[in-house]
Amino acid sequence: DAKTTQPTSMDCAEGRAANLPCNHSTISGNEYVYWYRQIHSQGPQYIIHGLKNNETNEMASLIITEDRKSSTLILPHATLRDTAVYYCIVREDTPLVFGKGTRLSVIA
Amino acid sequence: EAGVAQSPRYKIIEKRQSVAFWCNPISGHATLYWYQQILGQGPKLLIQFQNNGVVDDSQLPKDRFSAERLKGVDSTLKIQPAKLEDSAVYLCASSLAGGGPYQSSYNEQFFGPGTRLTVL
């Protein structure tokens, strides 16, 4: 079973920041937080991961709370192509376990 | 760089028939994964190979599913006989190496486009 809780769906206006929350209250000290997304009819795509510090790459930023029980994925300027299902996964040295994710709809 | 290749993209069969899917991972990737994704759910790992050896097949229904990666490169997943509940997208993924998350470039999984199986 997935160790994370995410909202089922969210909407975001094009050009605005999309903030996708994830709760992982049972995360252990060595587990990382991973984010993948899956655009319709495609396989999942890696976005970002982190342990406890905030992380940023060309796709997104990951903000992890100090107690590590929750995190937020930020897409700074959402475009229509960011419409997808976003999966938050916690893992250490174990297979990826995908939940149902958050369906993000970016609206023009 | 070429991505993970899968074929066929779509397959329709009747229950109790057999079907096989093929995956060619990214060149040089030692680890290969097969996932099953039922409509409305996230992908579920079926089997993980490290080179040509099985690392994890705990969720593979071994009475009807089999997979092989004989030369440590491409892989086939077979279902025999198929059931209605096997209707799903079968995704193949590869990574440079398996194991822990400490080196993201080594453990990022790259997914293929999947094979959509419909069992009638």
Image: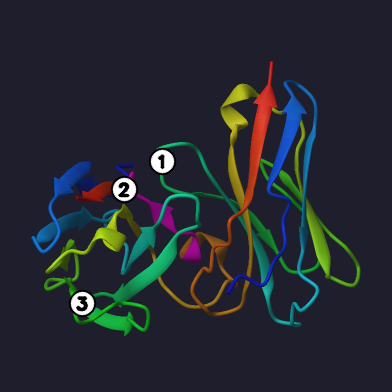
Say which quarter of the image contains residue A52.
Answer: bottom right
Residue at 18% in and 75% down:
B64
Which element is circle 2 on?
A: loop
Subunit of mark 3? B
Subunit of mark 2? B
Q: Amino acid at mark 2?
A: Gly
Q: Label 1 near label 2: C-beta < 8 Å?
A: yes
Q: In the rendered image, which residue does mark 3 sit on?
A: B52
Q: Mark 2 and mark 1, same subunit?
A: no
Q: In the rendered image, which residue does mark 2 sit on?
A: B114
Q: Earlier in the sequence, mark 2 or mark 3?
A: 3
Q: Which residues are magenta?
A: B107-114
Camera-side mark, 2 or 3: 2
- Give B6 or A9, whichever is nearer the viewer: A9
Q: Position of residue A36 (x, y in %)?
A: 57, 52
Residue A77 seen in the current view: no
In space, the residues marked 3 and 1 are separated at their CA atoms by 26 Å
Say which quarter of the image contains residue B49.
Answer: bottom left
Residue at 33% in and 44% down:
B113
Of the numbered discs in the image, which one, if any, rests on residue A42?
1
Residue at 24% in and 50% down:
B117
Predominant SS of the magenta segment: loop
In space, the residues marked 2 and 1 are separated at their CA atoms by 7 Å
Is B2 included in the stretch rendered in magenta?
no
Residue at 17% in and 45% down:
B11
Say which quarter of the image contains residue B102.
Answer: bottom right
